[in-house]
Amino acid sequence: MGDSRASLQLPDAALAEYLGAHIPGFQGPLQSSKFKGGQSNPTYLLEAASGRYVLRRKPPGTLLGSAHAVDREFRVLKALHGSGVPVAHPLHLCTDDAIIGSMFYVMSYIDGRVFWDPSLPELQTEQRTALYEVLLQTLAAIHAVDVDKAGLIDYGKPGNYFARQLDRWSRQYRNSETQAIPAMEALITQLPPRCPEDDGSIALVHGDFRIDNLMFTPDGGKVLAVVDWELSTLGHPLADLGYLCMALRLPRNPALPGLAGMDREALGIPDEPALLVRYAELTGRSIPADWPFVLAFSFFRLAAIAQGVAKRAQQGNASSEQAQQAGQMVQMLAELGLRELQK
């Protein structure tokens, strides 16, 4: 691997001096510690004399083009802070690589609970049902953002979202390919002809909308913040919904635990038809006839992302110990996507 922990450590004294000059009220000294997760962009807790903060940075080393865009994350947090979508307060963006070795931003610390497993073993049945409801309400709120008023009208290219994403992630996959995977080749060939006609839907899409990218109150009854906006853009809102529904089909695994094979009714977790109906009620959007395409697209895109993680692990600059596990999932994700496409 050669993933040096030293390369991910922050220069606490120099960082405290810099932040003291750029964030009103900030006072050092500070002590930094890296959070688990944040596989793509390393994320740190900063404990300073003036309180707690969170720092997200580009990983050091050679990176794929257009990846790890922490400046885009900062922009979308600024646009959403104070809106109907709960996010942390963005405090400062530093584009000078000399300070810590890569671009970073600092935001307020949210004392929220993260649920890493979508089966929610920590909660009672009725709490699980309530959490999935607020999950869908939060997704609907993201998709209801007026991108023009929010100053995000140029945050992504308009139209043909699925076609553009297929092209982008096919190229990203090729750039990080480490072995031949027949199911990925089949998806790269078969997905583009199945692309739906552009229906004109344009919304802010999160791009990585899953339970562990939200912070909740302890009982899961309220969302305090949506995090990890690195993959956000303007696009088709149903892509986020398809991505969320992938968890229903993913098997139990350490990298991205899914719900396949679990008794969701006994758990109090709605099944996919119920999720789709509720989302349609909340947003007024209809679910497309070719829903299997949306799911297959979601699996393909996640497989391409996982391949990027695998490549970074190979190069030694992946930021999470789960990186290798995620890389091993590429074939499984591609095969699940192909299964949906063949329905």
Image (cartoon, grey):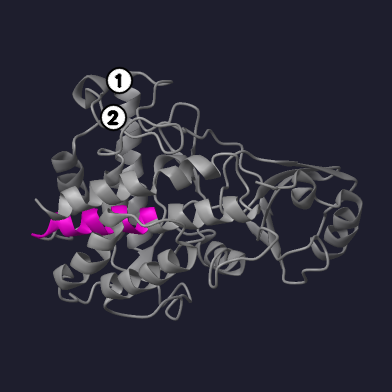
Amino acid carrying label 2: it is Thr
Specify whether residue 146 is in view. Answer: no
Q: How many marks?
A: 2
Q: Whole-Å distance between the Cαs marked 2 and 1?
A: 7 Å
Per the rendering, the mark at residue 125 is 1
Q: Position of residue 92 (x, y in %)?
A: 71, 63
> Image quadrant of residue 35?
top right
> Position of 21 compared to 109: left or right?
right
Can you identify the residue that label 2 sits on? 129
**Secondary-structure class at tag 1:** helix
Specify whether residue 186 is in view. Answer: yes
Q: Position of residue 59 (x, y in %)?
A: 66, 58
Residue displayed at 41% across by 72% down: 171
Q: Are marks 2 and 1 in contact (CB under 8 Å)?
A: yes
Q: Residues within 10 Å of mark 2 (few under 14, many from 20)?
A: some
Q: Is residue 299 magenta?
A: yes
Residue displayed at 22% across by 50% down: 279
Seen in the picture, residue 323 relative to 295 is either above or below; the reply is above
Q: Residues within 10 Å of mark 1 (few under 14, many from 20)?
A: some
Q: Is residue 182 magenta?
A: no
- Report the magenta residues as a range: 289-303
Residue displayed at 80% across by 47% down: 6
> Position of 250 compared to 115: left or right?
left
- What's the magenta bit mostly, secondary-structure-wise? helix
